[in-house]
Amino acid sequence: MQSKISIVCVYNDQVQFESMCSSALRFGLSQIEIIGLDNRESRWESAAAAYNEGVKRSSAPYILFSHQDIVFTDSIFFADFIRELDEDDTQIIGVAGAKLTKGKTNRAMLSGMYQGSKLWRHHTIASKARVETLDECLFGCHKDIFKKLHFDENACDGWHFYAVDFCLQAGLKGVPSFVIPANVLHLSGGNRDASYYLSQEKIKKKYSEVFDVFATTCGWSRTEDIDPYRPIVEDELNALIESNISYGINFYRPMEEVFSLDNTYFLPSSCFLESAKDCHYCKQDAHLSQTLKNDNYRIGYDILVAVNNFIAGKEWLLNDLLDLKADYIKSANEELATSPEYRPRREMNAKAILSSVVANANASSANHEVDKEVAFDGDVQTLNEQLEGAFHSGTKQFVTFLDSIDRYLVSNSYVAGEMTEWARLLLAESSSNLSRIFNLKRANDQIDEIADCVRSLYVKLFRYRILNCIKKVARRK
């Protein structure tokens, strides 16, 4: 019987590859053809080149491109993948993807897979959803699509963006991309090293006349310049500087809006502005480049940026973790409730135990303040470490620490004009706005306690299952 799906995988880790193959063949209902592309000796210089070779070797009508660290946990994904392409063979299907939000200044990530383990699912979708681009970890389509598309080995000459480019190509030819729910594990979280940003530059150049901005599961990118408000912006700029690639920065938001704690915007420090080919500012900030030529004001700007990025980073990360941790507990509860392997004894009521932990976590959720007063010591090089220490001391101490930064800036004449207003927004009027972030911190702390309980329950139930098996074997003898 002819295979229905060809799984193409380029790998450099034999153990991971064999694990992926084993899980696929176990649940693939005899419809799977594996095309392994052994790259342990660097035969292929890019994923695009390897996958184009894989397409040529494939014999099945449907092709899946898989990372080596994918693990399939049941047959449902294969059945859904086949059904989707049987119904419409002019679409691309994946397990994670992204689309731009309204205004094209952010991206929404949509995922139907588990990240790292069966208990960590993130940005979960309940049903099929359209996206602009798909993540490279697992995606596929009908082989006939390669009659009009291919993996671009020039633009994607490394190991990043080949699925993004493929989806962008497809979208321009009227071929849509979708994410579907999938009981699939992706054992790693990706790697945004310097090569990632250099690959991104090639994709930006390729599509600069077609798109203003495009979305990926790692973020969003403007094709003509750098969007300075993303959490990864300084990593990107460092990679460009080290590779002698020129760049421009477009500050399309007023600085007064960026420095407000009502938002979660990041900013690059002054050294990246100095290295830029050009910086475009909003009308009210047009003289900022001239202002930053003053050494004192440049120090003031960098201090304000460090504080802004720290607070924005905390809110961004805590929101992200809260989403992930909440889904962990939901998934764990589902496992406890439905899996016969982990079904507890009658006297071990998992729901009651969890309810008790939740109540205890809520009761102990008050933020424990540290009595020792904290103040900025003037060492800009260690400002992030000082901010971290003050943050973990509690709301009151953190606000006090920000007040000390405000006094330091004024007493040393590091701010003037509109920068004084930015400092007021960020430092002097921070108390009420910061409550949102500390509420997030408390919610994360609470959910950590609950997650610890879930993990301990699994250990107990696993032990019980093993003991039960031993007793059964003993009775048989």
Image (cartoon, rainbow, N blue to C red):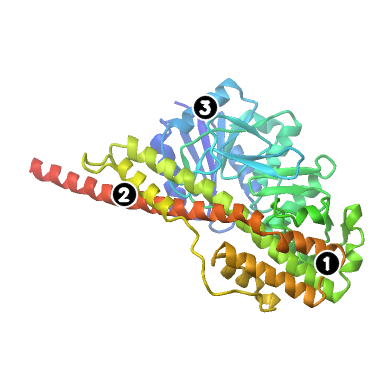
Residue 160 visible to an observer of this rendering? yes
Asked if marks 3 and 2 touch (Cβ < 8 Å), the reply is no
Residue at the spot 64% in from the left edge and 58% down from the top edge: 313
Relative to 241, does residue 328 appear above or below in the rendering?
above
Which x, y percent locates residue 6? 52, 35
Q: Residue at x 88, y 53 (%)?
A: 282
Q: Residue at x 53, y 44 (%)?
A: 122
Q: Quadrant of the C terminus?
A: top left
- Three-letter code, disc 2: Leu
Residue 82: which numbered mark, if any? 3
Residue 359 location (% of width, % of height)? 38, 48
Three-letter amino acid code at the position of disc 3:
Ile
For marks 3 and 1, give the one nearer the viewer: 1
Q: Which quarter of the figure is the N terminus placed in? A: top left
* Label 1: few (<14), some (14–19) or many (≥20) C-alpha neighbours in 10 Å: some
Please indicate whether residue 305 sits to the left or right of residue 138 in the image.
right
Determine the secondary structure under disc 3. Answer: helix
Determine which residue is flagged by label 1.
275
Mark 3 surroundings: few (<14), some (14-19) or many (≥20) residues within 10 A: some
Residue 222 badge = none
Describe the element under mark 2 as helix, strand or loop.
helix
Residue 457, numbered label? 2
